[in-house]
Image (cartoon, helix red, strand yellow):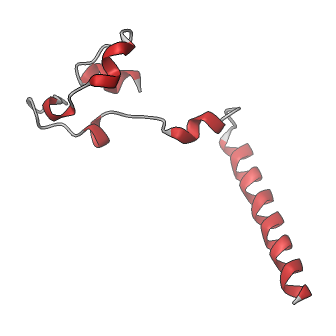
Protein backbone atom coordinates (compact mmCIF):
# COMPACT_ATOMS: atom_id res chain seq x y z
CA UNK A 1 0.00 0.00 0.00
CA UNK A 2 2.83 2.35 0.84
CA UNK A 3 4.26 2.24 -2.69
CA UNK A 4 0.92 3.20 -4.23
CA UNK A 5 0.73 6.28 -1.99
CA UNK A 6 4.26 7.31 -2.95
CA UNK A 7 3.52 6.82 -6.67
CA UNK A 8 0.48 9.08 -6.22
CA UNK A 9 2.70 11.81 -4.79
CA UNK A 10 1.64 11.42 -1.15
CA UNK A 11 3.88 11.07 1.89
CA UNK A 12 2.86 8.04 4.00
CA UNK A 13 5.19 9.27 6.75
CA UNK A 14 3.06 12.40 7.07
CA UNK A 15 -0.43 10.91 7.67
CA UNK A 16 -2.10 14.23 8.38
CA UNK A 17 -2.06 14.86 4.63
CA UNK A 18 -3.63 11.52 3.72
CA UNK A 19 -7.12 12.32 5.00
CA UNK A 20 -7.38 15.56 3.04
CA UNK A 21 -5.94 14.50 -0.28
CA UNK A 22 -7.56 16.01 -3.38
CA UNK A 23 -7.87 12.95 -5.61
CA UNK A 24 -9.08 15.01 -8.57
CA UNK A 25 -5.44 15.95 -9.18
CA UNK A 26 -4.07 12.45 -8.62
CA UNK A 27 -1.01 11.75 -10.72
CA UNK A 28 -0.56 8.01 -11.14
CA UNK A 29 2.24 8.38 -13.63
CA UNK A 30 -0.21 9.37 -16.37
CA UNK A 31 -0.21 13.15 -15.97
CA UNK A 32 -2.10 15.30 -13.47
CA UNK A 33 -5.76 14.44 -13.05
CA UNK A 34 -5.63 11.14 -14.94
CA UNK A 35 -5.21 8.77 -12.01
CA UNK A 36 -8.12 7.14 -10.18
CA UNK A 37 -8.05 6.95 -6.37
CA UNK A 38 -10.11 3.74 -6.39
CA UNK A 39 -7.76 2.13 -8.90
CA UNK A 40 -4.30 3.59 -8.34
CA UNK A 41 -4.12 3.84 -4.54
CA UNK A 42 -4.29 0.54 -2.73
CA UNK A 43 -6.18 0.25 0.52
CA UNK A 44 -7.00 -2.48 3.00
CA UNK A 45 -10.56 -1.42 3.73
CA UNK A 46 -12.59 -1.86 6.89
CA UNK A 47 -12.29 -5.65 6.86
CA UNK A 48 -8.60 -5.51 7.69
CA UNK A 49 -9.51 -4.82 11.31
CA UNK A 50 -10.74 -8.40 11.59
CA UNK A 51 -7.43 -9.87 10.43
CA UNK A 52 -5.50 -11.49 13.28
CA UNK A 53 -3.12 -13.76 11.38
CA UNK A 54 -1.45 -14.28 8.03
CA UNK A 55 -2.24 -17.86 6.99
CA UNK A 56 -0.46 -19.74 4.25
CA UNK A 57 -2.47 -20.54 1.14
CA UNK A 58 -2.69 -24.15 2.37
CA UNK A 59 -4.10 -23.04 5.74
CA UNK A 60 -6.51 -20.65 4.07
CA UNK A 61 -7.86 -23.39 1.76
CA UNK A 62 -8.17 -25.83 4.70
CA UNK A 63 -10.09 -23.24 6.75
CA UNK A 64 -12.36 -22.41 3.82
CA UNK A 65 -13.12 -26.08 3.23
CA UNK A 66 -13.78 -26.68 6.94
CA UNK A 67 -16.12 -23.67 7.18
CA UNK A 68 -17.92 -24.76 4.01
CA UNK A 69 -18.45 -28.29 5.36
CA UNK A 70 -19.73 -26.88 8.66
CA UNK A 71 -22.19 -24.61 6.83
CA UNK A 72 -23.46 -27.45 4.64
CA UNK A 73 -23.87 -29.68 7.69
CA UNK A 74 -25.76 -26.99 9.59
CA UNK A 75 -28.10 -26.31 6.66
CA UNK A 76 -28.67 -30.04 6.13
CA UNK A 77 -29.70 -30.38 9.79
CA UNK A 78 -32.06 -27.42 9.47
CA UNK A 79 -33.65 -28.82 6.29
CA UNK A 80 -34.04 -32.28 7.85
CA UNK A 81 -36.07 -30.74 10.71
CA UNK A 82 -38.56 -29.27 8.24
Tell whether 29 sits left or right of 17: left
| Nearer to the camera, 61 or 5 | 5
Q: Is residue 57 left or right of residue 43?
A: right
Q: Quadrant of residue 5?
A: top left
Picture residue at 12% right of the left edge, 33% below the top: 30
State the quadrant of the N terminus.
top left
Percent x, y of residue 76: 84, 79
How far across and down, in percent of the image, does residue 56 sit?
68, 38
Against 7, is 54 above or below? below
Taking the spot 20% from the left edge, 28% from the top edge, the residue there is: 22
Residue 34 lies in what quarter of the image?
top left
Question: In the current view of this chain or complex, which residue is farthest to the left?
Answer: 31
The quarter of the picture where the C terminus appears is bottom right
Q: Which residue lies furthest to the bottom in this view?
A: 82
Q: Where is residue 29 in the image (x, y as percent from the top left)?
A: 16, 28
At 70% from the left edge and 32% from the top edge, which residue is drawn? 52
In the rendered image of this protein, does residue 60 appear above or below residue 82? above
Q: Is residue 80 above or below residue 32?
A: below
**Residue found 85% across the figure and 72% down from its top:** 73
Amino acid sequence: MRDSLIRAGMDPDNPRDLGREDFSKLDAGQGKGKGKAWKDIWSAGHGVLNMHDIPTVHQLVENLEKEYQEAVSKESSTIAKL
